[in-house]
């Protein structure tokens, strides 16, 4: 008898959908397409020679550790390096506060596993990171969305949703994916004090904080929170779980991220991670440590910043040159993305089909919204990635996109032909 597999799937699988971005990426693989769709770092900045040297060293000098099972918490020298790095930014983390994960994406899944019961509400930004929605959906999550503007999450709109008692807030303060926006200093203070007032934890996802192209570094929420908490010198309390990753500073293929949290929270996450994968690949952890050590990572990040800053500037300049005045966009101070808003009546999904005919691709914005109730204009946005195409491709891609946009505007009689 052949098994009807779908009737065997657990109820939780009903809430799971594949990522539209992965499907779109397949459509955009044709070589003639200039794609602003993925969130990919530029492969031409991967430090390949340093990887080669480090691989050799790891196998010659550390093979017995690198090829063996390891602690669930992660490779201690790497955790220590991360804790030291974070202390430079005022995070009072010790090695015991750091858990290495298989990318930040696994961190999001573990946090879902740790905190979400079916029917629990999670407060998210509108728009928010699609991968977080995918990670949380499987746990039967309901969402409360709060809009963002150019200064990030609208903290002035938070009190009413917080009174609904969400389980936690998921926030991207730096160069948000997809919006490209950054939470302002005063909103950071407001957010942390509201979390404190209502006793609602914050999950601070910060993959892009190192990729700032202008302006001053802003204080992470986890630091502001520690200022508020009484502090026992050991970081055993606090309202914030902080996440980051090597994906955008070294290489996403490493699949290395980390969680920073009060010690008891880390201990519980370690138990959950044991069931998921025992530990993150020891080989890639030792490798990343050998690559990053000394001053290498700092120097490498400076190089990435200058490459991406130029690409951002080229994209902003091309948008200004080619796009009609009815269209607006964000001006990110860092990260990999900017967010375009089309005039009322236009639909980014329809535009996507037309853009593909012009051999240019982007991600329509609606998949970045947890629920459609908060924002009547979700169909009008597109996310553009500027890290993965070379400057001349960016200029040409935006020109092609402007052709599709203008044709669509004329079709809708938003502008005269
Ligand atoms: C906001 C955000 N969180 C998490 C991730 C996942 O990163 P990782 O490659 O570390 O799993 C990404 C990747 O694009 C992201 O943009």
Image (cartoon, grey):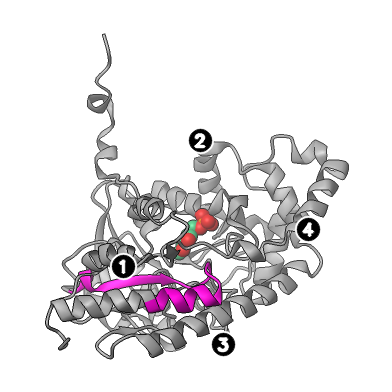
Q: Is residue 382 magenta?
A: yes
Residue 293 found in image quarter:
bottom right
At x 28%, y 79%, the residue is 341
Q: Is residue 98 magenta?
A: no
- Which residue is denoted by mark 2 in the rendering? 275
Q: Report the magenta residues as a range.
A: 377-399
User: On residue 49, which mark appears?
Assistant: 4
Which residue reaches farthest left? Answer: 413
Q: Residues within 10 Å of mark 1 (few under 14, many from 20)?
A: many
Q: Are marks 4 and 1 in contact (CB under 8 Å)?
A: no
* Labels 4, 1: front one: 1
In the figure, is residue 338 to the left or right of 265? left
- N-terminal of the pair, mark 1 or mark 2, is 2
At x 71%, y 54%, the residue is 288
Who is closer to the viewer here, 37 or 10?
Answer: 37
- N-terminal of the pair, mark 4 or mark 2, is 4
**Distance from label 1 to label 2 (Cα)?**
44 Å
Q: Residues within 10 Å of mark 4 (few under 14, many from 20)?
A: few
Who is closer to the viewer here, 329 or 137?
Answer: 329
Element type where label 1 sits in the image:
helix
Q: For disc 4, does the CB lie below 8 Å from ligand 1? A: no
Residue 145 found in image quarter:
bottom left
At x 38%, y 64%, the residue is 359
- N-terminal of the pair, mark 3 or mark 4, is 4
- Which residue is denoted by mark 1 in the rendering? 355
Q: Establish if 112 lies above or below 82.
A: above
**Distance from label 4 to label 2 (Cα)?**
36 Å
């Amino acid at each position: 008898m052949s098994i009807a597999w779908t009737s065997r799937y657990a109820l939780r699988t009903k809430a799971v959908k594949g990522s539209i971005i992965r499907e779109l990426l397949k459509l955009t693989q044709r070589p003639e397409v200039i794609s602003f769709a993925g969130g990919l770092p530029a492969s031409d900045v991967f430090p390949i020679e340093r990887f080669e040297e480090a691989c050799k060293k790891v196998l010659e000098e550390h093979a017995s550790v690198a090829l063996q099972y390891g602690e669930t918490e992660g490779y201690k020298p790497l955790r220590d390096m991360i804790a030291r790095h974070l202390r430079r930014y005022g995070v009072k983390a010790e090695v015991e506060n750091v858990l290495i994960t298989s990318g930040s994406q696994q961190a999001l899944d573990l946090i879902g596993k740790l905190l979400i019961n079916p029917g629990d509400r999670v407060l998210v930004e509108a728009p928010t990171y699609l991968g977080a929605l995918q990670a949380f959906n499987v746990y039967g999550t309901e969402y409360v969305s709060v809009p963002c503007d150019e200064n990030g999450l609208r903290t002035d709109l938070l009190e009413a949703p917080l009174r609904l008692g969400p389980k936690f807030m998921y926030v991207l303060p730096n160069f948000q994916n997809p919006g490209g926006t950054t939470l302002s200093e005063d909103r950071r203070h407001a957010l942390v004090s509201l979390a404190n007032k209502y006793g609602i934890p914050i999950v601070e996802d910060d993959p892009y904080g190192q990729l700032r192209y202008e302006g001053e570094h802003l204080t992470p929420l986890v630091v502001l929170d520690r200022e508020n908490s009484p502090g026992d010198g050991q970081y055993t309390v606090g309202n914030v779980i902080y996440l980051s990753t090597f994906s955008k500073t070294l290489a996403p293929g490493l699949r290395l991220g980390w969680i920073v949290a009060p010690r008891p929270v880390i201990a519980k996450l370690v138990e959950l991670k044991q069931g998921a994968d025992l530990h993150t690949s020891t080989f890639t952890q030792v490798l990343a440590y050998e690559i990053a050590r000394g001053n290498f990572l700092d120097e490498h990040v400076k190089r990435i910043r200058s490459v991406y800053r130029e690409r951002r500037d080229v994209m902003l300049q091309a948008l200004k040159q080619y796009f009609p005045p009815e269209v607006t966009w964000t001006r990110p101070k860092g990260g990999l993305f900017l967010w375009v808003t089309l005039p009322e009546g236009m639909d980014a999904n329809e535009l996507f089909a037309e853009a593909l005919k012009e051999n240019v691709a982007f991600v329509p914005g609606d998949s970045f919204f947890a629920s459609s109730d908060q924002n009547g204009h979700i169909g009008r946005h597109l996310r553009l990635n500027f890290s993965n195409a070379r400057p001349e491709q960016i200029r040409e891609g935006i020109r092609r996109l402007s052709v599709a946009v203008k044709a669509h505007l004329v079709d809708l009689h938003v502008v005269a032909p």
